[in-house]
Amino acid sequence: MNILGINGDSAHKPTRGSHDSGACLLQDGKIIAAVNEERFSRIKQDEQYPFESIHYINTQIPSQSIDKAALTWLPPFKQKKMLDQLFQHLFQISSNHPILRTFYWKQQHSRWGRLLRVNRRELPTKLTHIPIAPVVEHHHCHAASAYYCSPFSQTDRVLAITLDGQGDFAAGSVWIGEQGNLNLIERFDALNSLGNLYAAFTAHLGFTPNRHEGKIVGLAAHGDPSHITEQLLSKSNLHDWHHLFDAELTLVTMRPLSAETKVIMDRICAGCSREDIAAGIQHFSEIAVTTLVEMLCNQHQTDLLALAGGVFANVKLNQRILELPCVKNIYIHPNMGDGGLSVGAALVAYAQQQKGVKPIFMNSCYLGPEVSNIEAEDELKKNNLPYSVPENIADQTAKLLAAGKVVARAAGRMEYGPRALGNRTLFASCSDSKINQWLNERLNRTEFMPFAPIIMEDYANAYFPKWSPEHLTARFMTVTYDASDLAKKKIPAAIHIDGTARPQVLREEDNPEVYAILKAYHQRTGIPALINTSFNMHEEPIVCSAYDAVRAFQLGNIDALIVGQYLTCRASAS
């Protein structure tokens, strides 16, 4: 059974769709290939129809061998039902709030009809012979991507939680995964969107909402959260996520960039620095979600969590969840945002076809295009770059890194999801605590989080005492841990001001080539970890092809580049 999963809007007319469109190939329940359109178009979180992503899938399998296509989002008649429920809720809470009431009547008049009109899912003309599975609702896709890719067994009772900005007029959902089936428990409509509230604070601080929330997570460690947290708690009911916010916060989530919202935000944030504001929304989010998780774990008698949706891109939040006494283990889908919806849709279609399937742990994110040696050599020659084929490329790389050089790597299959995991990565020593400043300047980035470490699994517990081998989600850089004194001494460049780090814990069998670099570096320095940050220029997607890699190498003033089997160095790094 070969299933093509697609997250994208109409294939026949240009419309605005779900951000971060993409496609995947599911073969008998196992993900064979998955990629997002941004990597080909070079437009970050590209929302256009994923023609290039589908073309890549067709290089892995001919279209005539695809048995079924699975598409995301709901058809208009089902969306209308959900929209009616949302408006009923909006009417109830707007009665004593004039601005929100005006907003209600304006939106009621249009019924957000433009959204209902454009959300028609189709296949490209050349694929119209493929049968289409029932179209899958947004949060069902998120839940499926978390549960069916988790390391939990078929007999485990798993709580699947999804939280994001909104999709299909919902901001979250709760499911029970058991015996290979997902059963919906409840859904939270878009008026209760913690994701949209966080995005509103991101915008208020001058960053781009739905893109720069990670900067807020990093900035939060520098501030005092007390005032903002107190303000937000007074306007929220954390024990009822169907009526989570008061009228003012609801307006903020619905109209984050409006003049009315600015007045509300200015009042909430009065007298606070941007660091305090960031700390406040981060701390409130941690309290809100951990309160929800505790209620759900107790209610449904389970301690295993499968998580997806953009809210769970927040690695500090994920740490707080994992540390809860009621939680034994968590799994976060590596492409937790909308980029993971195509995988979720395909998994739902497969589970429906088979009438339930056991979770198959997605132990690899290397699901994208591979850089071929032919392509790599061609780009190096075009750009007149000297190159070699080292007999021991791992040792040569370790030598450069031990000398303080920055080495980019574009080899093997590209990672699926927002994290670089060694194949489209910049490596550097973790020993220089000032690297966050000078390397970001080279790459023209503005970051508040330190660079994350990649560490050999055998040493992970010594550097991060609360890490456990059962925490398989840490293989994908989805959670932070408190660092040990040893880590603070040996890898200070990877430790944030709050004493945490977001490691990628690597086993040799997961990526032998990158593990060999780590091992060689450890032999030279006694340190089993390296800086691992994504290989891309500022505000660009992670590199995909050899062309992208060579371009970023030259523009980023990087010391050395591994592309395919080749190594090229600047004269100063040789």
Image: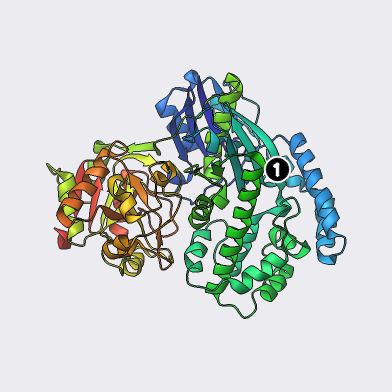
Residue 111 drawn at (x, y percent): 80, 48
Residue 262 drawn at (x, y percent): 69, 71
Snapshot quadrant of residue 483: bottom left
Q: Is residue 573 left or right of residue 473?
A: left
**Residue 411 shows in this picture:** yes
Q: Residue at image x 80%, y 59%?
A: 103
Residue extending farthest right: 95
Counting every numbered tag in the picture gives 1
Is disc 1 placed on a helix, strand or loop?
Answer: strand
Q: Is residue 151 above or below residue 475?
A: above
Q: Residue at image x 20%, y 52%?
A: 522
Q: Residue at image x 29%, y 36%?
A: 509
Residue 310 drawn at (x, y percent): 56, 50
**Residue 15 shows in this picture:** no
Determine which residue is flagged by label 1.
187
Q: Is residue 129 above or below residue 228?
A: above
Snapshot quadrant of residue 472: top left
Between residue 114 and residue 201, name the one nearer to us.
201
Which quadrant would the C terminus be assigned to in this image? bottom left
Disc 1 crowd rating (10 Å Cα; few below 14, some 14-19, many 20+) is: some
Residue 546 drawn at (x, y percent): 31, 44
Residue type marked 1: Arg
